[in-house]
Image (spheres, grey):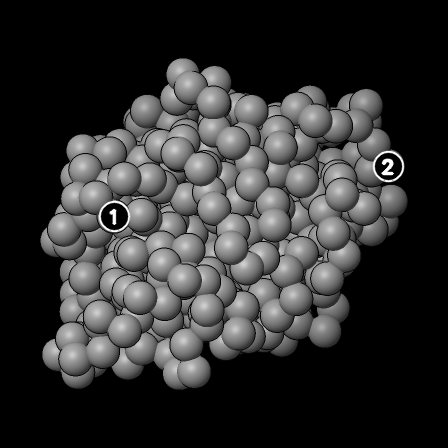
Amino acid sequence: MAMMESIARSIARMEQLDLAGKRVLVRAELNVPLEGSKVVDDSRIRATLPVLAAASEAGASQVLLMSHLGRPVEGLPIAEQPQFSLAPVAARLSGLLGFEVPLLDGYLEPGFAPGTAPVCLLENVRANVGEKSASDDLAARYAALCDVFVMDAFGTAHRAQASTTGVARFAAEACAGPLLHREIEALGQAMRDPARPLLAIVGGAKVSGKLELLRALARLADHVLVGGGIANTFLRAAGHPIGSSLHEAGLVEVARELMEQANIPLPVDVRVASDFRADARAEVRMVEDVAAEDRILDIGPATEQLHADLIASMGTIIWNGPMGVFEFPDFAAGTRRIAVAVAESSAFSVAGGGETVAAIERFDVAAGISYISTGGGAFLEAVQGVTLPAIAALAERAANRAKFATTKSATIKFATTNTPPEKPCP
């Protein structure tokens, strides 16, 4: 994290650039859950509002937003896979802003003109050939749409793609947006020189999916709480019966090694059921009394109290993942208690990951969390100390800014003609 922070300090920030009269292209994170054509959770859309407000206040002539949504087939027109259209996002954004935000397709075609709307949304970038491979040709065509590129999608900052890293190399100017900057600052505060003691809460189904995170936090944190299927693997490593619970037998030895390296308090009691069903009824067992037919689906009340007491004494908390299957009514109590405890704590708290954010919203504790990250995979990689590709790309541009000044006029000409340059800007 220290290396990423050092790199991030060198990159240009949106508020440092002159945006007056310029067209701004913002890579946002608008990959939101949908039910048909309805946005189920608009938190990522609302998180985009500050960059739009900042661009407007700075006098930008127009803002073009681009994002992905789901996993469309690359090269297949969105009209042929409409379930991946950003149309519901455009509609919700229009409602939040109070004016129509047009959804634009065909923006890669020669002679494309975005019109005069102050804010426009470009159709799903993941349908464009070369997006995931970070094609220079595609990145250059994105850059042709703007005078300034703003990377504000922390949730995709760990992806080296045309719309996240490639366009930063071709655009006339490239910088970090306010959301990206706040993410880096919050994670830096939690990890650079954290108020001690530092507690990490890591839940989820599999140790394998968060193994590097656990290893990184084992070195950094004073305490690590584990939940979900991850906790089951650790319980088995400690010699406790886990019945038919989800766990990873092949990582039991790794769990033992982690317990030798870090203070990992394990559950003392759990909630179990014989079947994995939403209407399953919970029974509380002490961990030594779990039966062969039992499935552990949540921590128990005694563990809730022990964890809550520990949380109350912390100086910094990093939270990623639930304590159990909180979507099932009888197995939501553990995650609810942890969420409330984190919110009521005086510690500086950073929470990230899709399930974590869902739990925060379900239990209505957002006001008590110091910072809620919009990133999933990016959050995990940043906590592990990985330098995110999008941040590295912006830093590279900043390092070569003086050299870039000599070619700036040629690049701006390209941005108005929609003809790709032969080489990226330095």
Q: Quadrant of residue 241?
A: bottom right
Where residue 268 appears, as percent x and y from the top left, is 56, 44
Q: Residue at x 87, y 44 (%)?
A: 293
Name above or below for residue 189 compared with residue 99.
below
Left or right: 256 as drawn, with respect to 57: right
In front of the other: 114 or 323: 114
Q: Secondary structure at mark 2?
A: loop
Residue 335: in sight, yes or no? no
Q: How many numbered circles are shown?
A: 2
Where residue 233 appears, as percent x and y from the top left, is 65, 60
Q: Residue at x 31, y 36 (%)?
A: 52
Left or right: 97 as drawn, with respect to 327: left
The numbered dot on residue 55 is: none
What residue did someone put label 2 on? Answer: 275
What residue did someone put label 1 on? Answer: 22
Where residue 252 appears, as percent x and y from the top left, is 65, 70
Q: Secondary structure at mark 1?
A: loop
Left or right: 415 as drawn, with respect to 128: left
**Which amino acid, mark 2?**
Asp
**Screen quadrant of the C terminus:** bottom left
Name above or below for residue 345 compared with residue 255.
above
- Mark 2 or mark 1: name the one nearer the start of the chain: 1
**Screen quadrant of the N terminus:** bottom left
Within 10 Å of disc 1 (Cα), the crowding (few <14, some 14-19, many 20+) is some
Within 10 Å of disc 2 (Cα), the crowding (few <14, some 14-19, many 20+) is some
